[in-house]
């Protein structure tokens, strides 16, 4: 006689041969591959950007202050084995004969920079090489080419700096902080810190910026930061990458969000396949459970047996998927490596753990409700094949699925906003699919007899929901892959501005417009006023206020001056989120960028006071807007009504596109307007555009995972209904239905289900895609009729073909064998 243990082994062997088990494994594998490949890829991207950030900052961590920094910080850092360097920055006049030029003087210690290099050349455009500060001879300094040009000097010439004579040794081509200081008017001059006292420029009353730089491994930096934070004074701040390169940051963040959203949709779709496979699997196992229970197996033993099998399936899928994901990420990363411009760092192991955990959460969250319902059923009820023995409560599966999906989303993105948006989108999609399916099927019932349509029932509604969710995920990703990427690319088209012109004087605005018009290079010119926010609602505001104690960005914003501007028309790429734009002829009001308003804790209707060179302007916030920072056009945190700054000192700014085929335009412009400063942003523009194209390609790769997941869902759904379909066909055949009639009805039924599911999926994908475009990616919503047509047709064709292929074998079987 077979023992209980032998019976468990027999059932285990049979379990692994089932088609449902293979579908379950495939769905888990797709989910893990999607999660781990994107996880490895974004992990390496983050590490690479962190490397670039340290090179941009000159160290792993930087403290900045407007006052001399306590030397005890340096002493403690050196005790902990950290490398250290320091700088002092201020503005001063540099002269040669009768020529004078205001320069940004940066006195640095010998070890500066701790990360990155100062690249110099002997002449403009000459051979570039790295220069260490400690290799400079006595009285030697290095400077931007602008300083050489302004003073009419060459390498080796002497200039006057304060009380001392210095030798301009080399031209600076690249240095840490260069990108973040792109809009600094004065050319940079770097000198050894040891030479600073002899210049006599720095006194107790001098305005200067001090910084300490630190470098070490991650553990050392984290430990030192924890020690340092409680000791920082109000004037001392830890500097981060957020202080510079917002365009590159926004482009990279968008790219990673696209990839993560694509991977999440693949996971959700795979989850639907897992749920269906698990449902079909548990229905298939009712007889096996009956046998085990009649042999004395307890509910706990049965639960443990099947749960262990499911977890083993998840573990194997997690391991295999992680290995595949690791190799696939090399393909994705090869494209990012060109964008970063350096070899990507190796990845960590975290994506592996995330992949393994994803598989376990998916199988538990999506399978457990079916398993628990199965093991609760009494043996006699299962053997009698009563309708699932008992009605399954809907609350448990709903809670289990919701928590599983939300947990997976947060695990993948660490972005609660993105996770909640997608969860809400999926839940709304489920509810809408179910309600709309029932309503439309009622209509079909009324038309059914007249048009000889298949009988509509609740099972058909369920299939509409199942296929609809799968198609919804595919179509939403199609929207993501095409529409959103296309709109992102269109936001930075060929011919986007590649030069900023700043320091334009009021009397030069009209002549400059006329000159640009001659070259067909028209662009809006904005006034630019420097102002410090000093009051909100007539109350003084300070970076040291308690409300900003934990908000370093707000503290930084309040310690510097804003670039303010005024405009009658809302700049291209800006979108109103609250209030409305200035009406024609408006003389008052501020329009504020939403992000900075949130950081500073100000809202619609608040009254802001800015100090502009000793004069004050007070206006009320009349609108909030988002800003497309990577548009490469002038953007402002605060815009005022036209004429608001007529009586304030100001310069003007614009951005233009200069075609490489017209190299004479810029020299002519600078010759006619010598006070205008040109800033070439072609390199940044190329980086952003390159990243957009690479993100588009990478998303297409992730799209393949979702297609595979969609196929799994399709066949899992059909497999879950195959037993019921077998009974229906047996009854119809016994009543005389021939093969042609059955084939026609099956294809028509599947086409109806697929077409209805595709239509609903396309409408919801269009809505969800536009919400994502606006809320997550700050892109303009659009209507796409083609998506609805594509969704309806795709659903009808795919489901009818797949459905017929799934059941056609049953059409040839005689009724008696079907009844068996």
Image (spheres, rainbow, N blue to C red):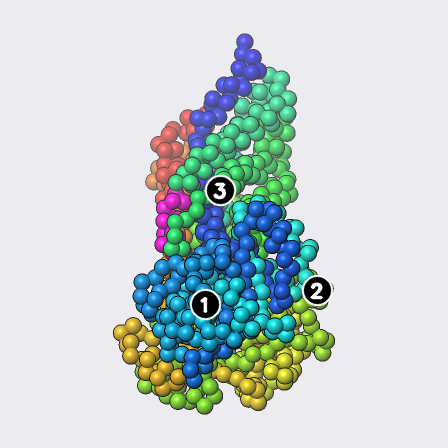
Please tell me whether mark 3 or mark 1 is closer to you in this view. 1
Q: Could you tell whether 550 is left or right of 28 in the image? A: right
Please give the name of the residue rendered at 68% of the width and 64% of the height, measured from the top-left corner. Answer: 234
Residue at which label 2 appears: 547
Q: Earlier in the sequence, mark 1 or mark 2?
A: 1
Classify mark 3: residues with Cα within 10 Å, few (<14), some (14-19) or many (20+): few
* Image: 741 above or below 110: above
SS of the residue at dot 3?
loop
Kindly report the distance in space between the C-alpha atoms of the residues bearing marks 3 and 2. 37 Å
**Count of marks overlaid on the render:** 3
> Relative to residue 768, is residue 457 depicted above or below?
above
Q: Give the farthest residue toward the top.
A: 1
Residue behind mark 3: 348
Mark 3 in CB contact with mark 1 (< 8 angstroms): no
Q: Secondary structure at mark 2?
A: helix
Report x, y in % for residue 438.
Answer: 54, 51
């Amino acid at each position: 006689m077979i023992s209980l243990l032998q019976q468990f082994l027999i059932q285990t062997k049979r379990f692994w041969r089932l088609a449902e088990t293979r579908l379950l494994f495939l769905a888990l594998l797709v989910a893990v591959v999607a999660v781990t490949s994107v996880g490895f890829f974004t992990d390496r991207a983050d590490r690479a950007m962190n490397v670039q950030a340290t090179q941009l900052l000159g160290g792993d961590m930087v403290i900045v202050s407007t006052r001399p920094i306590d030397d005890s910080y340096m002493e403690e850092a050196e005790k902990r084995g950290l490398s250290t360097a320091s700088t002092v920055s201020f503005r001063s006049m540099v002269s040669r004969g009768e020529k004078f030029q205001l320069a940004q003087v940066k006195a640095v210690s010998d070890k500066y920079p701790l990360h990155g290099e100062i690249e110099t050349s002997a002449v403009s455009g000459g051979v570039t090489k790295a220069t260490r500060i400690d290799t400079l001879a006595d009285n030697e300094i290095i400077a931007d080419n602008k300083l050489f040009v302004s003073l009419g000097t060459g390498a080796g010439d002497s200039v006057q700096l304060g009380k001392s004579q210095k030798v301009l040794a080399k031209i600076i081509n690249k240095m840490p902080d260069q990108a973040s200081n792109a809009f600094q008017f004065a050319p940079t001059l770097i000198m050894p810190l040891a030479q600073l006292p002899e210049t006599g420029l720095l006194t107790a009353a001098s305005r200067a910026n001090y910084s300490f730089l630190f470098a070490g491994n991650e553990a050392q930096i984290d430990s030192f930061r924890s020690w340092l934070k409680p000791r920082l004074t109000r004037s001392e701040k830890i500097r981060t990458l957020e202080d510079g390169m917002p365009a590159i940051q926004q482009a990279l963040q968008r790219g990673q969000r696209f990839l993560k959203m694509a991977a999440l949709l693949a996971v959700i779709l795979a989850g639907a396949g897992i749920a269906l496979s698990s449902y079909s699997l548990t229905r298939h196992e009712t007889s096996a459970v009956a046998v085990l229970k009649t042999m004395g197996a307890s509910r706990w033993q049965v639960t443990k047996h099947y749960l262990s099998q499911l977890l083993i399936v998840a573990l194997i899928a997690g391991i295999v998927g992680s290995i595949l994901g690791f190799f696939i990420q090399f393909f994705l990363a090869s494209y990012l490596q060109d964008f970063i411009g350096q070899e990507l760092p190796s990845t960590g192991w975290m994506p592996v753990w995330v992949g393994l955990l994803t598989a376990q959460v998916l199988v538990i969250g999506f399978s457990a409700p079916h398993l628990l319902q199965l093991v609760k059923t009494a043996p006699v009820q299962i053997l009698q094949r009563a309708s699932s023995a008992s009605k399954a409560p809907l609350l448990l599966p709903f809670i289990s699925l919701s928590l599983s999906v939300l947990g997976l989303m947060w695990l993948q993105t660490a972005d609660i906003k993105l996770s909640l948006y997608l969860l809400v989108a999926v839940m709304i999609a489920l509810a809408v699919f179910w309600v709309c399916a029932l309503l439309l099927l009622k209509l079909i019932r009324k038309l059914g007899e007249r048009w000889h349509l298949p009988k509509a029932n609740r099972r058909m509604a369920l299939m509409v929901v199942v296929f609809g969710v799968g198609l919804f995920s595919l179509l939403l990703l199609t929207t993501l892959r095409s529409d959103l990427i296309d709109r992102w690319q269109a936001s930075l088209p060929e011919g986007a501005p590649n030069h900023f012109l700043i320091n334009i004087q009021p009397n030069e605005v009209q002549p400059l417009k006329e000159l640009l018009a001659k070259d067909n290079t028209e662009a809006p010119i904005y006034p630019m006023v420097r102002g410090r926010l000093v009051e909100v609602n007539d109350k003084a505001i300070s970076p040291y206020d308690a409300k900003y104690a934990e908000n370093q960005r707000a503290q930084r914003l309040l310690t510097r001056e804003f670039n303010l501007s005024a405009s009658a028309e809302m700049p291209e790429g800006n979108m109103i989120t609250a209030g409305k734009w200035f009406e024609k002829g408006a003389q008052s009001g501020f329009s504020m960028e939403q992000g900075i308003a949130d950081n500073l804790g100000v809202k619609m209707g608040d009254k802001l006071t800015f100090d502009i060179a000793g004069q004050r302007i007070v206006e009320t916030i009349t609108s909030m807007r988002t800003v497309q920072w990577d548009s490469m056009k002038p953007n402002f945190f605060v815009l005022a009504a036209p004429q608001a700054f007529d009586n304030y000192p100001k310069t003007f700014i614009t951005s233009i596109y200069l075609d490489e085929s017209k190299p004479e335009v810029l020299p002519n412009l600078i010759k006619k307007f010598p006070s205008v400063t040109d800033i070439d942003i072609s390199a940044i523009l190329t980086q952003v555009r390159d990243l957009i194209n690479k993100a588009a390609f990478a998303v297409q790769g992730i799209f393949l995972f979702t297609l595979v997941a969609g196929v799994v869902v399709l066949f899992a759904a059909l497999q879950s209904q195959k037993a019921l379909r077998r009974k229906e066909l047996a009854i119809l055949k016994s009543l005389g239905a021939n093969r042609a009639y059955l084939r026609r009805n099956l294809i028509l039924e599947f086409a109806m289900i697929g077409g209805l599911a595709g239509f609903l999926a396309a409408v919801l994908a269009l809505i969800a895609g536009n919400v994502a475009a606006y809320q997550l990616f700050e892109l303009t919503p659009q209507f796409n009729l083609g998506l609805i047509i594509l969704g309806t047709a795709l659903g009808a064709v795919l489901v009818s073909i797949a459905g017929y292929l799934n059941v056609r074998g049953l059409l040839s079987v005689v009724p008696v064998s079907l009844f068996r």
